[in-house]
Image: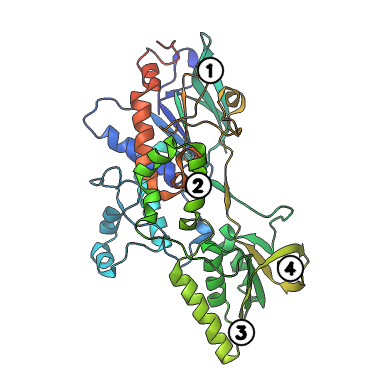
Amino acid sequence: MAQAGPGGEPPVHDLIGVGFGPSNVAMALALSEHRAGPDAETPSARFFERQPRFGWHRGMLIDDATMQVSFLKDLVTLRNPASEYSFLCYLKSRSRLVDFVNHKSLFPLRVEFHDYFEWAASHVEDLVSYGHEVVGVAPVVEGGSSTHLDVTVRSASGLSVHRTRNLVLGTGLSPRMPEGVERGERIWHTSELLSRVEAFHRAPPSRVIVVGAGQSAAENVAYLHRRFPEAEVCAVFSRYGYSPADDSGFANRIFDPEAVDDFFTAPEDVKRRLMDYHRNTNYSVVDIDLIDELYRQVYREKVLGTERLRFLNVSRITEVVAKPDLVRATVASLVTGEETVLDADAVVFATGYRPADPLGLLGAVAGHCLRDAEGRVRVERDYRIATEDSMRCGIYLQGGTEHTHGITSSLLSNTAVRVGEILRSILEGAPRRLRTAGRPGGSAA
C-alpha cells in the first residue's frame, strides 16, 4: 500500500477500486500486467470488497448452466491475448486444456467460469481487502480544486480513511423485485436460488412458481423441475412464449469494442434505436437449446399424462401473500383478466437486476458531477464521469453506462478492453499530471 503522507495524512493511492467483482478483478489484472512491463511507473492501487471472499452470482451456479459469452471474452484476452491470466491458462493450470478443446464448445459451464474468476482473483489478492465496505467519499480541496478523494472504509476493525487520485466504481448490480414485493423465506429472487432451495432438503416442495421470461427464469424452471421430481413447477410470464436470444454473428457485433465507439458518438435518437434493435441479444431472451428442451419436456408430460411443468403465459402476478407454511400467488390473464390463485412452497422472481446508483457513494462529490438533459450522469469515452473543472481527480464507472456506451457496458463481453482504456486514461490523462506534481498531498501543477 502507499505510504502515509506528511503530517500523518492518509496514504495516497493512484487508484482505489470499489468492489471486486469480475470488472475490478480485470482492472487489477491489467494493473498487475502494467507493473510487470517495461514502464518504470508503478501505480499504487487498492480495492475494497465488502464480501468476505470473491463471489459472482453464487446463487445461480446451477450445475449445467453455461455461459452466454465465449470463453475468449474472459478478463484479459481481448486486451492482451498473451496474458498469463486467460481462461486458457486457467484450464492449463487445472489440467483440463486438452479436455476443453475436445469438448468443442465456446461456452464453458458457469460454475467453471466462476472458478476461473476465483483463480484470477487469487493472483492479485495482494491488491484487495475483503470484508471492507466503502461507506463514503469526500473531496480533498486544495487551492480551490479537489485534487484527491478521501475514501472511508468500514471493516471489522472499524473505520479507516484512504486517499486516492482516482476512483474506479465497480459496485455491480442489485436484484430487482416488483414494486410492493419483498423478499422473504418463501419469496425469492433468482440470485439466491441455490442457497434457498437447501431449505427443502427435508420436505421437498409440492409446487414452485417462477416469474419471468429471460434466461435466468428458464434456467430456474428447468433446474427446479429436475431437482424436485415430484413437484409442479409453474412458469408465469407476460409473453406468449420464451423468445430466443439472437446470438448470430452479425447481431453479436453490437458487443464488439468498435461498437462502443459507434454508440458513444451516435445522436441520442440513434442510441435509442440501437438499444431497441438489439435488446433481443441480451434482455428477456433465452438460449434456443433451453427453449427446445423445455418444450420437449412439457410435450412429453402431456403425452404421458404426468404434467408437472405448467406455463401460465400472457399472464402476470398481481398479488403475493406470504403465509406461515406457504405463499399464495394470484395470477391474472392479460387477455381475459381471469384470476388463478396458486398456493406454492416458494415463488422465485427472475426479474433481473438494476445497476447501482453511480453517484450513491459519492456524497458531496456527486454535486460536482455533470448530468445530461435527462438527468443522467455524463460519462466520457474513457468511462470517466464528467465533472466540474474544479474536480481534478478521476472517477470512473464500470457499469451504469448503457446510456453512453451501449448495451455491452454492463456485460462481460467488453470488460477486458474497458479496463485497459480506464488504466490508459489514468496513466496518460489529467490524473497523471497530479501524480507527477510533487509529494502526496501537494498542490497540483
Alpha carbon separation for disc pair 1 and 2? 41 Å
Considering only order in the chain, which callout, 2 or 1, is on the residue closer to the N terminus?
1
For disc 4, the marked residue is: 332
Q: Which residue is mark 2?
A: 273
Q: Which of marks 4 and 1 precedes in the sequence?
A: 1
Q: Nearer the viewer, residue 82 or 277?
A: 277
The amino acid sitting under disc 1 is Val
Amino acid type, mark 2: Arg
How far apart marks 4 and 3 lie (CA) works out to 21 Å
Q: Residue at x 33, y 56 (%)?
A: 71
Chain-order first, disc 4 or disc 3: 3
Q: For the C terminus, which image quadrant? A: top left
* Circle number at residue 140: 1
Please indicate, yes or no, whether residue 120 appears anywhere in the rendered image: yes
- The residue type indicated by label 4 comes to Ala
Q: Is residue 419 left or right of residue 330?
A: left
In 3D space, how far apart are the residues under numbered discs 1 and 3 (Cα atoms)?
65 Å
Q: Residue furthest bottom?
A: 304
**Which mark is nearer the camera, 1 or 3?**
3
| Front tag of 4 and 3 | 4
Q: Nearer the viewer, mark 1 or mark 4?
A: 4
Secondary structure of the residue carrying tag 1 is strand
Quadrant containing the N terminus is top left
Residue 307 is marked as 3
Query: Disc 3 residue type?
Result: Glu
The answer to whether residue 400 is seen in the rendering is no
* Residue 185 x, y percent position in the rendering: 69, 62
Instruction: Say which element carries label 3.
Output: loop
Q: Are marks 3 and 2 in contact (CB under 8 Å)?
A: no
Crowdedness of circle 1 by 10 Å Cα count: few (<14), some, many (20+)? some
